[in-house]
Image (tube, rainbow, N blue to C red):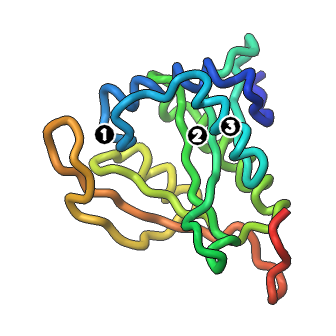
Amino acid sequence: MPKIRDASRLDAETCAAIYAPYVTGTAITFEIEPPTVEEMAARIESTQATHAWIVLEDDDGRVVGYAYAGPMKPRAAYRWSCEVSVYLELGRRRTGGGRALYEALFERLTERGFRTAVAGMTLPNDASVGLHKALGFEEIGTYRKIGWKLDAWHDVHWRQRPLAVLPDPPEETR
């Protein structure tokens, strides 16, 4: 049975391997060079310290996907909002893994006091737009021709969803 757990630096190699084909062969991410294992380990550790990074293991205990959240923007007033992303091993889209990862991620973020999740999707990406829509993300808008990659301009579509409705003023995130 698939399992979701918190990531550690020991997952860096697998997460980097899952992410690399998105970097080198798609415009889904605007990174140009795949991060090294050490860079991925540092990302996992810094993200765990402030937000959350989780992995999905298949029935054999092999990591096949991950999701994480980070700051939406650096200014203090945004600290209860976060940007979320999910990546699955190629060939695993539309298998329920993305939904399971996001639902577990949202639980962790809510426990830490975050109120809003924001996600950006490079277009076209019907699978990602559909996943976010199914999970209650509402359309915010689209940045047109905002990123140049693979010899073309790409739009980025933005959506957001509430994580928690809590009393105001908000408590600091944990």
| Mark before the other along the chain sequence, 3 or 1 | 1
Mark 3, residues whose alpha carbon is within 10 Å: few (<14), some, or many (≥20)? many
Q: What's the CA distance linking mark 3 and mark 1? A: 22 Å
Which circle, 2 or 3, is nearer the viewer?
3
Say which mark, if any, is on residue 45.
Answer: none
Q: Regarding mark 3 in the picture, which secondary structure is present there?
A: helix
Q: Regarding mark 1 in the picture, which secondary structure is present there?
A: loop
Residue 110, by quadrant, is: bottom right
Percent across and percent down for residue 164 are: 75, 71
Q: Is residue 90 left or right of residue 146?
A: right
| Mark before the other along the chain sequence, 2 or 1 | 1
Q: Residue at x 79, y 36 (%)?
A: 6
Q: Is residue 152 left or right of residue 6?
A: left
Q: Residue furthest bottom?
A: 168
Q: Which amino acid is tagged 1?
A: Ala
Q: Is residue 85 left or right of residue 50?
A: left
Q: Is 3 drawn above or below residue 17 in the view shown?
A: below
| Mark before the other along the chain sequence, 2 or 3 | 3
Which circle, 3 or 1, is nearer the viewer?
3
Percent across and percent down for residue 36 are: 52, 23
Residue 74, by quadrant, is: bottom right
Q: Is 7 drawn above or below residue 112 in the view shown?
A: above
Residue 46, by quadrant, is: top right
Q: Which amino acid is tagged 2?
A: Gly
Say which mark, if any, is on residue 27.
Answer: 1
Q: Which amino acid is tagged 3?
A: Ile
Q: Residue furthest left?
A: 151
